[in-house]
Amino acid sequence: MNSILSIQSITKFYGRIRALHEVSFDVPAGSVFGVLGPNGSGKTTLLGILMDVLKASGGSYAWFGQPPSEQQRRQIGTLLETPNFYHYLSGERNLQIAAAIKGRGQEDIPRVLEMVKLTERRHSKFSTYSLGMKQRLAIASCLLGDPSVLVFDEPTNGLDPVGIAETRELIRDMAREGKTILLASHLLDEVEKVCTHVAILQKGVLLTAGDVNEVLMNEDFVELGAPNGDKLREVLSALPGIRQLKQSEQHLQAFFEKDNIDLGGINQYCFEKGVVLTHLQLRKKSLESKFMELTNK
Amino acid sequence: MLNTLRVEWMKVKNYRAFWILLAVTVLSIPGVNFMFYDLFDNSFPKMKGNKMAMNIFGTPFGFPDVWQTTSWNASLVFLVPAILIITLTTNEFTYKTHRQNVIDGWSRSQFFRVKLVEILLLSLFTTLLVVLTALCFGTFGNKVPEGQSIWQGSRFAAFYFVQMISYSMIAFMLALFIKRAGLAMGIFFIYMIVESIIVGYFGNHRKIEAVNYLPEEVTDRLIPQPYLKAIFTQQRVSYWESHIPIYLAVAAVYLLLYYFGASRRFLRTDL
């Protein structure tokens, strides 16, 4: 089995409002799969359906190649939307309840509390926690029992920059251990740093999904500058493999058909054609600019 | 189910409000009975030994009538266990822990069933309190009539159990649909009053029998008012006896409706 999660044509209506429209994608085992989209795109709705807190209007999904069941959810550490705990109980007691429901992880409580730096406040009531502490307790709950799959919905909500960096590092550590992570976020910079795969949603419609390198394929470009801009453009137009030329404010941007761009080859080519380059730099198109491009269509 | 109940115990064992409400429940049943006992005893002190007076007022706290008396008195404080059920249920929605329990690894039906078991346990617990209260008052207050068992008349405790399950399920349904403690309690209380008014006007005044089978009234009729029983005609007593199976059957139908209504709500809709 290659896919931890397989989603087939999931549709969700809230009354007459269509929140998801035939969303389908697979999450490979061991991947860090980002589900991206602006507010209201359906990310949380999708994760809610996968966790059986919402009912899909159509479509199906399968965890671990099997029909959905509560036994599967016990194998998955999930943080969905907001941290949901009993306000009158301490952090530790809340984790005890979570571990009891999962059927494992009771002995793990001190470890996960230490990971999220809540050991000192473990006996304090949940109602006395700050937003960041509540979020960290929710992350700790996800980690109980060392699950092989993690589902995070905006895990850095409410965290300070240190907390955000620590969460990002935690996700990377989990990924290195071979865990599969499904991560919903609108913080594209964060997603780009950790994700191996992405799915981009807008207004409930899946715009694209796949390996992050494939989603960003053909999006690297080369910035060039020369004393004679017109001659540079003329020379580059005849370069084999060139897909598109764009003029930015200061430089010419060259887009190629294939990903393997040979800067040395370009430099030599221009020189042989009588153009001496004053500027030559490879630029990677960011996930953010790809996202903006897709969602503004 | 045992594991699920264990988790439910973990939720409440450190919840102060739970213990307070439970303590009030424990105290309210013998408390309300003692109040009536004291009223009865102090209001009619010359009645003791007066055979004619005793014939009129009866011995509501003696066997076998003590079963009916304690059950009826206990039903007056039904609001306390109902508040407990509403509080514990609406807490789950307030904190959204009903979602978290499902996310962590319970099925929706598991969550739903354990709440029903809690209602059953609470109803059994309050019924046990009624039984103990009846035995105490009956044993310490009066001699058991010759030829009678102390358990004669104990069917009223079973009727109380049916009544408590019914009230509890109504409270649970309201909590499930409304999801807010204050509003659910208010509607529960108002409904009880409104139904009483409807029964009073259309039942007693306009003699429309159908109102006797409204949800609260049908279980209330299982335990008639116990005081001044001598003034109840034999015809009235016979009417009540013959209708017990009907009351129980209608109560059972209502319980099924509550069950299916609540389960459909929780199992099939978005949490």
Image (tube, rainbow, N blue to C red):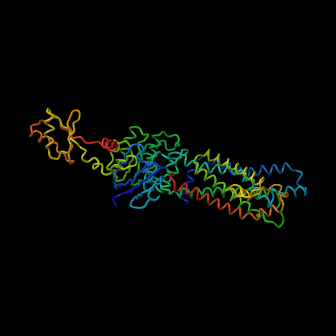
Question: From the viewer's perspective, is residue A230 above or below residue B248?
Answer: above
Residue A264 makes an appearance in the image: no
> Residue at (31%, 49%) from the top-left corner?
A196
The quarter of the picture where residue B148 lies is bottom right
| Left/right of residue B237 with respect to residue B88 in the rendered view | right
Residue A211 makes an appearance in the image: yes
Quarter of the image where the N terminus of chain A is located: bottom left
Q: Position of residue B68 (x, y in %)?
A: 77, 58
Q: Nearer the viewer, residue A139 or B90?
A: B90
> Residue at (66%, 51%) from the top-left corner?
B81
Q: Position of residue A20 (x, y in %)?
A: 42, 50
Quarter of the image where the C terminus of chain A is located: top left
The quarter of the picture where residue B65 lies is bottom right
| Left/right of residue A227 with respect to residue A203 in the rendered view | left
Q: Nearer the viewer, residue A204 or B270?
A: A204
| Left/right of residue B18 with respect to residue A224 in the rendered view | right
Q: Nearer the viewer, residue A249 or A114?
A: A249
Q: Position of residue B153 (x, y in %)?
A: 77, 62
